[in-house]
Amino acid sequence: MKITFAVIGKTVEDYLRTGEKIYFDRLKHYVKVNIVELSPPKKPRGFTPELHKKHEAQQLMKLIEKFDYIILLDETGRQYKSEEFAMELQKFMNRGVKNLLFIAGGPYGFDKEIVSKADFKLSLSRMTFSHQMVRLIFLEQLYRAFTIIRGEKYHNE
């Protein structure tokens, strides 16, 4: 199985970039993982959140392949405990899913075109985090899930 994590924009804070690199490097021992950073749209005259989402959707649609299982990181999605999330990942591996495509959208959410392509929505919390923080939190939870699957000592429950 391969995991692709698509994000809008770059992480600018050094401490967050360092954290992302730590968990990305750790994840490579468990799964093929790739992070794709898409450019955020410029705010032209007549800018609206809907136009912003459309621009993001156009970029995201270029990433989606026929057999991808698409999971949106979205505040309206289902929440899991870490152990439950690990079990879901294990199910994807058991089913032979070739690529899990996790998408963290921009500040205005997702365009309806992307929502219609999604197989699932996952919420990391009912709280709101910056998009840069979401990346780090998600990568850590992904790493945690793989250590749970392998029975390693990272998770304490």
Image (tube, rainbow, N blue to C red):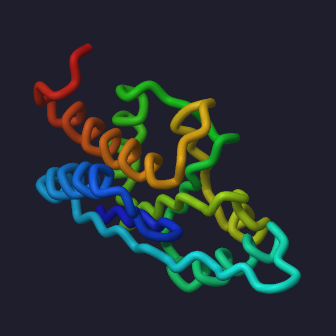
61 above or below 148? below
Report the residue at 49% width, 73% height from top: 67
Horizontal arrangement in the rendering, residue 148 relative to residue 16 (left or right): left
Residue 47: where, in percent of width, then height? Answer: 82, 77
Q: Image quadrant for the C terminus?
A: top left
Report the residue at 50% width, 77% height from top: 38
Report the residue at 34% width, 35% height from top: 86
Report the residue at 79% width, 66% height from top: 112
Asked whether 37 or 16 is in front, the reply is 16
140 above or below 135? above
Residue 11: where, in percent of width, then height? Answer: 40, 62
Q: Image quadrant for the N terminus?
A: bottom left
In the rendered image, the residue lying farthest to the top is 157
Horizontal arrangement in the rendering, residue 1 relative to residue 111 (left or right): left
27 above or below 9? above
Residue 55: where, in percent of width, then height? Answer: 70, 80
